Image (spheres, rainbow, N blue to C red):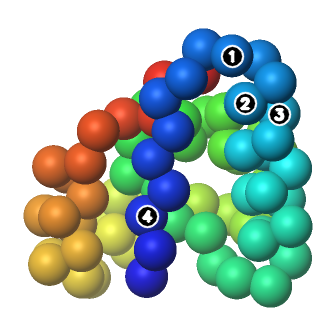
Amino acid sequence: MANIIVIDHDVKIQRQVVSFIRELDKTHHIRTFNRGDEFLKKYTSTPLPTEDSQKTDHQEDDEAKNLPHIDF
C-alpha cells in the first residue's frame, strides 16, 4: 500500500493531485485516513471505507493515524 501525503496550498498542485487520484481510482481501491476525506469523496468514484471497515486492519489504522493530514 502506498501513502500519498500532500501538504500544499497551491491550486495547481491540488488539481494535479486530483487528476492523479482520479486515474488511480480507475484501477485501485483508494483508502484515506485524514481530513481530506470529504475532498476526495468529491473527486473519486470509489467509496471510502467507514470507521467500522477501517477497524479490520489494526496495523494500517495505527500507522495511518500517525500520518500528517492532507490540507487543501
Secondary element under disc 4, as helix, strand or loop, is loop
Which residue is under mark 1? 10
Is residue 29 shown left or right of residue 58? right
Residue 3, labelled with which disc?
Answer: 4
Tell whether label 1 touches label 2 (CB within 8 Å): yes
Rounded to the nearest whole Å, what is the CA distance between mark 3 and mark 2?
Answer: 4 Å
Q: Is residue 44 above or below residue 62?
A: above
Marks 1 and 4 in Cβ contact (< 8 Å): no
Q: CA distance from mark 1 to mark 4?
A: 20 Å
* Cα separation between marks 2 and 1: 6 Å
Cα separation, mark 1 vs mark 3, equals: 9 Å
At x 38% / y 51%, what residue is drawn? 33
Which image quarter is the N terminus in?
A: bottom left
Quick one: SS at disc 3? helix
Residue on which disc 3 sits? 15
For numbered disc 1, what is the local secondary structure? Answer: loop
| Residue 28 drawn at (x, y percent) | 70, 82
Question: Residue 14 has which mark?
Answer: 2
Instruction: Categorize mark 1 by other alpha carbons within 10 Å: few (<14), some (14-19), many (20+).
Output: few
Camera-side residue of 41 and 17: 17
Picture coordinates of residue 59, whole percent (x, y) = 14, 78
Q: Residue drawn 34% across and 69% down? A: 54
Q: Is 23 above or below relative to 59?
A: above
Q: Is residue 61 left or right of residue 28?
A: left
Which numbered disc flags the more N-terminal residue, 1 or 3? Answer: 1
